[in-house]
C-alpha cells in the first residue's frame, strides 16, 4: 500500500489561509488522493479528493503537484472550528477481491490561534 | 438513519472478559470498515466488508478479534479475552461504491 508523509503538527492564525502538505512519492497512476479530518472526540469526516487536477469544494481546495508525488490541502480562511487532525490518504482502484483499503497515517494536527 | 451509529459509546470491561461492539452503517451502504485508534495515534485498519464478498481480515491483530456482518447491514466486532492493550477507540465507517467513507463517533473501550 502506498504511503503518505505529513508533518506532525502545524499552527495557523484565525482568518488566515492554511496550507497542509502531504508527500506521496510512491503513488501509482490510479491512486486517488483523499483528505479527511478528525475533530476532537469524533470520527473522521471527508474533506476532499482528487486524481490529477486541482479540486475545490465548499470546505477546501486540493492542489496536486504535476508529478503527483505531493499535494496540498488549502483552507482559505482558518477558523477555530478547523482545529483538527488532517489525514492524507491514497485510495487505489477497486481490486479483483473488491477491496478498497484506506490506510490512515498519523496525520497533521492543526492548531488555530485566535 | 442519518449517519453511522455505533454502540455503546463507552465500554469499560475487566481484563479477560469478552466484548461486543456494534455498528449500524448508513442504509444502502455496501462497504463497511472497522478501524482502531489508540490514544494519540492514527487509525489502524482492522477489517473490511464489501457486499457478499469474503471480508478482508488482514488487519485483525490476533485471533481474539473477529467481526461479522449480518444481512449486509449491521456489523459486530467481538474481542475475546480482552487485554489492556486492546484499550482504544474503535471506529466504524461505511460507504457505497467509490463514495467517501462516513464514520461513526466510535466506541471507547477501556480494559481495566
Image (cartoon, coloured by chain):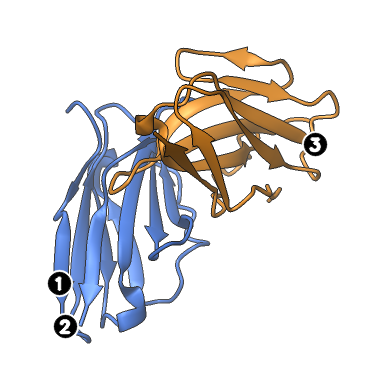
Chain colours: A orange, B blue
Distance from the alpha carbon under mark 1 to that under mark 3:
43 Å
Mark 2 lies on a secondary structure that is loop
Which residue lies most toward the right here?
A: A67
Letter of the chain that mark 3 sits on in the rendering: A
State which mark lies toward you, 3 or 2: 3
Location of mark 3 (residue): A69
Q: Residues within 10 Å of mark 1 (few under 14, many from 20)?
A: few
Q: Position of residue B100 (x, y in %)?
A: 46, 29
Q: Residues within 10 Å of mark 3 (few under 14, many from 20)?
A: some
Distance from the alpha carbon under mark 3 to that under mark 2:
46 Å
Question: What residue is drawn where x is 29% and y is 26%?
Answer: B28
Q: Residues within 10 Å of mark 2 (few under 14, many from 20)?
A: some
Q: How many marks?
A: 3
Residue B101 in sight from this viewpoint: no
Question: What residue is drawn where x is 59% and y is 41%?
Answer: A89
Mark 3 lies on a secondary structure that is loop
Residue toward you, B72 or B22: B22
Q: Quadrant of residue A84?
A: top left
Location of mark 2 (residue): B14
Distance from the alpha carbon under mark 2 to that under mark 1:
7 Å
Decide if residue A55 is on the left or right side of residue A104. Answer: right
Q: Position of residue B74 (x, y in %)?
A: 22, 44
Location of mark 1 (residue): B12
Q: Is residue B35 above or below residue A46?
A: below
Decide if residue A32 is on the left or right side of residue A15. Answer: right
Question: What residue is drawn where x is 67% and y is 37%?
Answer: A21
Q: Is residue B108 above or below residue A32?
A: below
Letter of the chain that mark 1 sits on in the rendering: B
Q: Quadrant of the C terminus of chain B?
A: bottom left
Amino acid at each position: 500500500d502506498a504511503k503518505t508523509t505529513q508533518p506532525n503538527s502545524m499552527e495557523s492564525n484565525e482568518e488566515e489561509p492554511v496550507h497542509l502538505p502531504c508527500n506521496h512519492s510512491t503513488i501509482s497512476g490510479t491512486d486517488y488522493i483523499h483528505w479527511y479530518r478528525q475533530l476532537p472526540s469524533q470520527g473522521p469526516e471527508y474533506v476532499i479528493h482528487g486524481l490529477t487536477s486541482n479540486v475545490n469544494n465548499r470546505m477546501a481546495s486540493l492542489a496536486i503537484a504535476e508529478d503527483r508525488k505531493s499535494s496540498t490541502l488549502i483552507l482559505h480562511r482558518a477558523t477555530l472550528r478547523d482545529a483538527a487532525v488532517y489525514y492524507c490518504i491514497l485510495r487505489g482502484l477497486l481490486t479483483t477481491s473488491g477491496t478498497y483499503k484506506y490506510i490512515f497515517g498519523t496525520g497533521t494536527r492543526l492548531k488555530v490561534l485566535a | 438513519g442519518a449517519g453511522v451509529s455505533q454502540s455503546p459509546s463507552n465500554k469499560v470491561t475487566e481484563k479477560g472478559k469478552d466484548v461486543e461492539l456494534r455498528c449500524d452503517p448508513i442504509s444502502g451502504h455496501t462497504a463497511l470498515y472497522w478501524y482502531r485508534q489508540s490514544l494519540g495515534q492514527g487509525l489502524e485498519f482492522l477489517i473490511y466488508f464489501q457486499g457478499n464478498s469474503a471480508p478482508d481480515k488482514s488487519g485483525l491483530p490476533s485471533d481474539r478479534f473477529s467481526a461479522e456482518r449480518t444481512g449486509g447491514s449491521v456489523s459486530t466486532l467481538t474481542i475475546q479475552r480482552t487485554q489492556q492493550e486492546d484499550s482504544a477507540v474503535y471506529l466504524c465507517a461505511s460507504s457505497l461504491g467509490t463514495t467517501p467513507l462516513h464514520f461513526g463517533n466510535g466506541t471507547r473501550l477501556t480494559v481495566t
